[in-house]
Image (cartoon, rainbow, N blue to C red):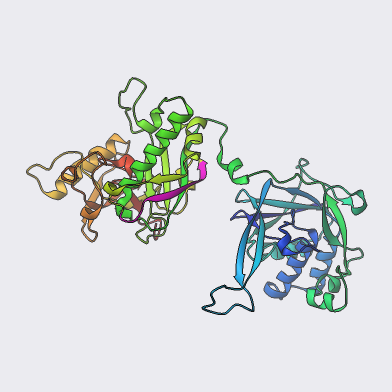
């Protein structure tokens, strides 16, 4: 029987210092050692599954004591340098006394990690015990290395496995495994007890090596740089010295579009991207709303912008992605109405095909109920009709133009001061600001979304979020 334990890291970060290495050396243990995995399973038994039969647990851990084959995901390695107050630091001191602490980590694509494989025989009780231990394993590495783990029985998966090599071979990554015959007490000895006995290495462990691939220069860039011209979504992080209100959504969206067009023109000898500009090479406006939507987002519902999503229903290619990746800052001036904000830092975090993978922004659905996040700007003037009838007609036209023909009920949202949002573009006067309204829409059937409608919808106006699938943005 071939038993495989898959350990994945949903947040993509693995903090683990190799045995015998000081934390400030900035070295990362990859893959996490089989010795660390066994200690994690033993700790899970004591802390989370203490009702399990001790003899069965010992038998399971003994079965996994032999050095496994491993298969590790590509990763990059990086570190954070922090200066923390030490024992000599005093509040109010002119020169604070600090110690340097290096937090080194491996970064993998979220949802990937490392797999361990053993050729062992487990009876039904042992397999059930192993399943429970592995399922309850909270992290592998330091405590911030949150993981998800599962057991499977491999039948036909021969590729990518790295077999252990003797330590004397001198090649590959050195790591620790349990010494045979297996001794559970030696596995569970505390570091302080071991040091008190003058030991430099646990008595129940020994060294082996794995020829795993070296770290790549930047795992984040490998993840976000596409090879095919089918990218529909790009997500950016926004940061600056001062927070930016969600009421300045239009200003930020315009600046982002201008920056993207500028970078694309610089890389393409002055050429323009139809997806960014919204016009074809002949200058004709594109039909069908298939070009880029620049959507600043208040991700945590605190009234401030932290994220910007570029959504392109018609897709963009590698050249457009390279232009987006080259953007570092957005510059503002006094006429933008940004107050003390003169610059925002922009960092590309992810590109992909599915807007639903961006994060919990409630933009996609499916949902029957939607509520305005930014004001809807009607595309025509109100005539001799009620406000509700005017908005129903305008929104219905917009939804049908975007392929959504579902009956809906509308409620005007008056709790937010929608008039305080910036509603005119940079080249327009304040008098040109469109009237803005917030609405709640209740559809007769589920609508997939995203709902971005009305004037300036490609600059973040008229955006709604689902209210029955997410609690907040």
Q: Quick check: 183 left or right of 454?
A: right
Residue found at the very far front of the displayed protein? 94
- The reply to whether residue 138 is in sight is no
Q: Is residue 199 placed above or below 211 in the rendered structure?
A: below
Could you tell me residue 422's position as x and y percent?
25, 49
Residue drawn at x 93%, y 52% is 168
- Identify the residue at horizontal 19%, vertical 42% (top origin): 429
Closest to the observer, 64 or 132: 64
Instruction: Indicate the quadrant where residue 95 lies.
Output: bottom right
Q: Is residue 340 above or below residue 92?
A: above
Residue at the top extreme of this rendering: 282
Where residue 180 sits, quadrant-wise, is: bottom right
Q: Residue at the spot x=29%, y=53% of the render?
A: 247
Quadrant that contains the C terminus: bottom left
Image vertical order of residue 204 relative to residue 156, above or below:
below
Name the side, left or right, on which 286 lies relative to 311: left
Q: Which residues are magenta?
A: 339-351
Left or right: where does residue 356 sit relative to residue 157?
left
The reply to whether the magenta stretch includes residue 182 is no
Residue 54 is at least partly visible in this image: yes
């Amino acid at each position: 029987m071939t038993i495989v334990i898959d350990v994945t890291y949903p947040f993509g970060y693995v903090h683990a210092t190799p045995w015998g290495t000081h934390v400030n050396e900035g070295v990362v243990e990859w893959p996490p050692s089989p010795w660390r995995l066994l200690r994690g399973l033993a700790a899970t038994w004591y802390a989370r599954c203490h009702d399990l039969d001790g003899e069965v647990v010992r038998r399971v851990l003994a079965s996994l004591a032999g050095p496994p084959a491993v298969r590790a995901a590509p990763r990059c390695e990086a570190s954070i340098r922090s200066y923390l107050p030490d024992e000599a630091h005093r509040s109010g001191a002119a020169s604070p006394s600090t110690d340097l602490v290096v937090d080194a980590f491996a970064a993998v694509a979220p949802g990937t990690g490392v797999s361990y494989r053993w050729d062992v025989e487990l009876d039904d009780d042992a397999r059930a015990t192993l399943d429970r231990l592995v399922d309850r394993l909270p992290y592998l590495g330091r405590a911030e290395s949150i993981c998800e783990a599962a057991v499977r029985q491999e039948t036909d998966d021969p590729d990518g496995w790295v077999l252990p090599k003797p330590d004397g071979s001198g090649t590959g990554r050195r790591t620790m495994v349990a010494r045979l015959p297996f001794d559970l007490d030696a596995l569970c000895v505390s570091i302080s007890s071991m040091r008190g006995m003058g030991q430099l290495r646990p008595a129940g462990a020994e060294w082996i090596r794995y020829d795993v691939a070296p770290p790549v220069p930047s795992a984040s860039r490998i993840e976000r740089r596409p090879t095919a011209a089918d990218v529909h979504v790009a997500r950016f992080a926004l940061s600056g010295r001062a927070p930016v209100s969600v009421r300045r959504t239009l200003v930020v969206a315009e600046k982002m579009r201008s920056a993207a067009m500028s970078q694309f023109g610089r890389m393409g000898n002055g050429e323009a991207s139809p997806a960014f500009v919204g016009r074809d090479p002949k200058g004709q406006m594109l039909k069908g709303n298939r070009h880029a939507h620049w959507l600043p987002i208040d991700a945590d519902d605190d009234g401030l912008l932290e994220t910007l999503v570029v959504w392109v229903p018609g897709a963009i290619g590698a050249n457009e992605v390279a232009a987006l990746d080259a953007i570092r800052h957005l510059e503002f001036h006094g006429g933008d109405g940004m107050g003390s904000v003169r610059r925002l830092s922009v960092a590309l975090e992810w590109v992909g095909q599915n807007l639903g993978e961006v994060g919990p922004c409630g933009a996609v659905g499916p949902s029957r109920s939607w509520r305005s996040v930014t004001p809807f700007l009607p595309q025509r003037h109100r005539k001799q009709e009620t406000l509700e009838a005017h908005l129903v007609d305008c929104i219905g036209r917009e939804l049908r133009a975007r392929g959504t023909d579902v009956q809906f009920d509308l409620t005007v949202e008056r709790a937010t001061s929608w008039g305080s949002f910036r509603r005119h573009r940079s080249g327009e006067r304040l008098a040109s600001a469109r009237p803005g309204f917030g609405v709640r829409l209740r559809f007769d059937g589920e609508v997939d979304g995203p709902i971005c409608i009305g004037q300036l919808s490609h600059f973040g106006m008229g955006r709604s979020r689902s209210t029955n699938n997410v609690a907040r943005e």
